[in-house]
Amino acid sequence: LMKLFYTRLCVVALISVCALVAQGQTIFTSVYHAPTFQNLHKIVYADMDTMYAIGDGATFIRTTDGGVSFTLSTVSSGYELLLDGDFTSATGGAVCGMGGLVGVTTNAGSSWVTRNVPGATKLVGVEFNAGTTSGFATDISGIFYTANFGQSWQKVYSLIADTAVVGQQDQFFASLRLSGTTYLAICNSQIVVKTTNGGLTWDSIGITLVKNPNAISFI
């Protein structure tokens, strides 16, 4: 049974990490202000021991030992705010954020190739299809698709202004993978769109959400 959970995003200047599994129990250890004072906005899990955190100032933090130690790097010299990330393996993945920034790495964040998606202003989601060079980035205004690992992008879905609420414009706030090449993108006005071909085409589906949610997760 899938359940939708909606929560207010709480951004703090400490790393609340790390799951250490011992004898079937999950133990959490708080690492205060180490290795950064930057606000962190998301943690991405590649596997049980490999985790990544992203945040302000293009901050990227990696642990490969379940949070015992961390490596800090900067994705972009523009120090953009990072809002989302996706790793399809322990070494290959992408992050995105303000100004349409997308950063791609093939060596677990040791180095990055960065590009700005033309027409995007605030990317809130990025997903790449495992084993391919195709993927998509979700901007607040629409969805952009790439077939060549981010070298070029095309806008494949645009939001229409929300006429039901005067003065409020529809904005995407998240995207997430359901399975394989099936994804959802969620809008603040209860619009949910779905793709089954890795982000190339999208259709609205009949799911009603709470108005103006801030986060979504499937478990």
Image (cartoon, rainbow, N blue to C red):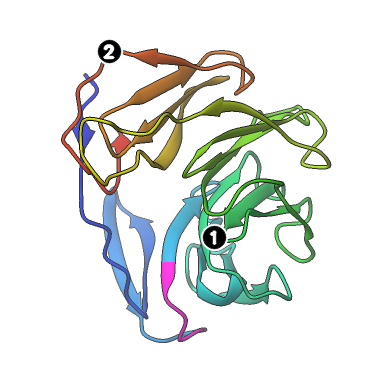
The type of residue carrying mark 1 is Tyr
Q: What residue sits 34% from the left and 13% below the top?
A: 205
| Residue 187 picture location, percent across and down | 35, 35
Query: Within 10 angstroms of label 1, few (less than 14), some, or many (20 or more) residues?
Result: many
Which element carries disc 1, helix, strand or loop? strand
Label 2 residue SS: loop
Residue at (49% x, 40% y) in the render? 141
Q: Quadrant of residue 200?
A: top right
Majority secondary structure in the magenta region: loop
Rendered view: 216 above or below 135: below
Q: Looking at the rendering, which quadrant does residue 194 occupy?
A: top left
> Which mark identifies residue 206?
2
Which of these two is toward me, 51 or 211?
Answer: 211
- Kindly identify which residue carries mark 1: 52
Q: Look at the image and give the residue range highlighted in magenta.
A: 36-40
Residue 50 at x, y percent in the picture = 56, 56
User: Nearer the N terminus, badge 2 or badge 1?
Assistant: 1
Position of residue 92 in the picture relative to residue 143 (left or right): right
Q: Quadrant of residue 79?
A: bottom right
- Left or right? Give the position of 158 relative to 21: right
Residue 99 rendering spot, x and y as whole percentages: 61, 60
Q: Is residue 124 above or below residue 128?
A: below
35 is within the stretch colored magenta: no
